[in-house]
Amino acid sequence: MIRNLFKKTFNVREGEMRIAILMQLYIFLVITVLLLIKPTVTAVFLSELGSSKLPYGYLLVAIVAIASSFFYNWLNSRFSIKVIAVSTILLFSVFFSLLSYFIHFDIFHTWLLYFYYVSISLFGVLATSQFWVIANIVFDLREAKRLFGFIGAGAIAGGIFGGYLTTLLAKHFGNDIVILVATALLISSLPIILSIWKIRIDQLNKYTKEERKDKKKELSGNSMSSVFQSKHLMNLAAIVGVSVIVAKLVDYQFSDISHKIYLDPDELASFFGFWFSSFNIVSLIIQLFLTNRLLARFGVSRNLLLLPLGLFLGSLLFLVLPELWVLILIKGVDGSFKQSINKVTFELSILPISYETKKQAKPFIDVVVDSIATGIAGFLLIFIIKGLNVGTKYITILILIFLVVWFILIYRLRNTYFDAFRKNIKDMIAGSKKSKKSKRKESSQALIEILQSGSDNEIITLMKHLSEAKVDIFKSHIINLLDHPSSRVKAEAIREVYSFD
């Protein structure tokens, strides 16, 4: 009875429960480890070197991340994702075990602290990206649409559990024990990966396995040119770059003032862990109860404004009241909105781009653009701190300038969003025409208009694109298509309705 209730609640079908739970547990452990290691390493780094060295850490992360991406692509072309994922876990388990030893015996060399600050950033990128590559091999598109919400909840749960566990362990046992527990949890993910391979991937027939692995190979395409050939992707890349710069500037302010208040590294790690988990709880609440309502009411582009608007108001408040609680509020807005409503709206914003182009462009945006922006933030902070010798409060002025740029880019995105959608449909359907008036309407409303009054080919093409999104606002319009006069549209609508959560 409980099993049936579970299946009905989470839309897990016969034969999927075991693999879905294993995948959820896998990402839960990865994010838990990340939330144990990251605040601890940051706390030790700040306590030993001070916040003035943090911008150099940002710069190193950017350089190493870009260089590592080329090496990782080389590994990716020569070894299976199973070998790479297992090797990654073993390598970082050794690194983290040694870190626990270094912390226990107070062995803190400057180069060692920079090494681990960069290492934890690389671990976060590698471990999570490997998980999603494996997930795309394990599940086909329709399975992914139904199950990724359930599986992704493991990531949010890991963020909540990991941060609060850091708070508890750092406060009562010390940072060396935090790292040791993280290492044990990371090693425990190894049998889970091997089980996933044994019960699912090894059971796929050769054709299906190669077809799904091709998704991974698409990531190594000419990603840079695919971005620069599209105005819409260039706008999205620019928004991501500016958002990363703002996030790093906010992170620096938060870390700097927190370090001045919590001088003990164990207390600082406990403080970071508590708030990182709290931000994840807020993110979960927004995701569950507000995201779809906000999208249905305001559409895509207006919801993209929520994060920078919240940061803008918080930054203005910090200029008046430069206190820690204001920075906690700003950091909370950044952490909670970024992983909920802003993440969903970004995925909807990239929806007009074809699947092939998207798969090439996203690695460039997620890794290269992110890394370059991190490096720019490091340079700016070094210039402000060393060059101008001003306090943390004045960094807020720089944040406000970048937020204005962010607003302008979102306004430009509104003009390219529907253009990109029309171009993609025209590329796939010869002779497709659409009223110019639609271009000026809110982007989500434009999609609804296609579902309500578009041609058969336009509607079918759009539904296939929407199957990659995990937002509920189009469901009622797709259900209405069950009465459409075209049998082809009805058939595609039935497939979509059947895969609804």
Image: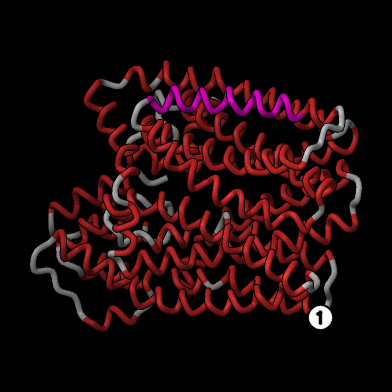
Q: Is residue 400 above or below residue 86?
A: below
Judged from this view, the residue extending furthest toward the left is 431
Instruction: Quadrant for residue 216, please give it.
Output: top left
- Percent x, y of residue 402: 58, 74
Residue at image x 45%, y 72%?
Answer: 301
Residue type at the position of mark 1: Val
- Percent x, y of residue 486: 13, 57
95 part of magenta stretch: yes
Q: How is the image coloured?
A: secondary structure
Residue at image x 33%, y 52%?
Answer: 223
- State the count of labels: 1
Residue at image x 77%, y 28%?
Answer: 100
Tell which of 165 and 378 is nearer to you. 378
Residue 456 in view here: yes
Tell which of 219 and 286 is nearer to you. 219
Mark 1, residue position:
320
432 part of magenta stretch: no
- Percent x, y of residue 246: 61, 66
Instruction: Quadrant for residue 419, please give it.
Output: bottom left
- In the displayed structure image, the side of residue 199 where residue 158 appears, left or right: right
Overall secondary structure of the magenta section: helix
Tell which of 141 and 253 is nearer to you. 253
Q: Is residue 286 above or below residue 61?
A: below
Residue 479 in view here: no
Q: What's the magenta region?
A: 79-99
- In the displayed structure image, the side of residue 446 where residue 368 appears, left or right: right
- Percent x, y of residue 382: 69, 64
Q: Residues within 10 Å of mark 1 (few under 14, many from 20)?
A: few
Q: Is residue 494 above or below residue 217?
A: below
- In the displayed structure image, the side of residue 391 where residue 485 appears, left or right: left
Residue at image x 75%, y 26%?
Answer: 180
Q: Quadrant of the C terminus?
A: top left
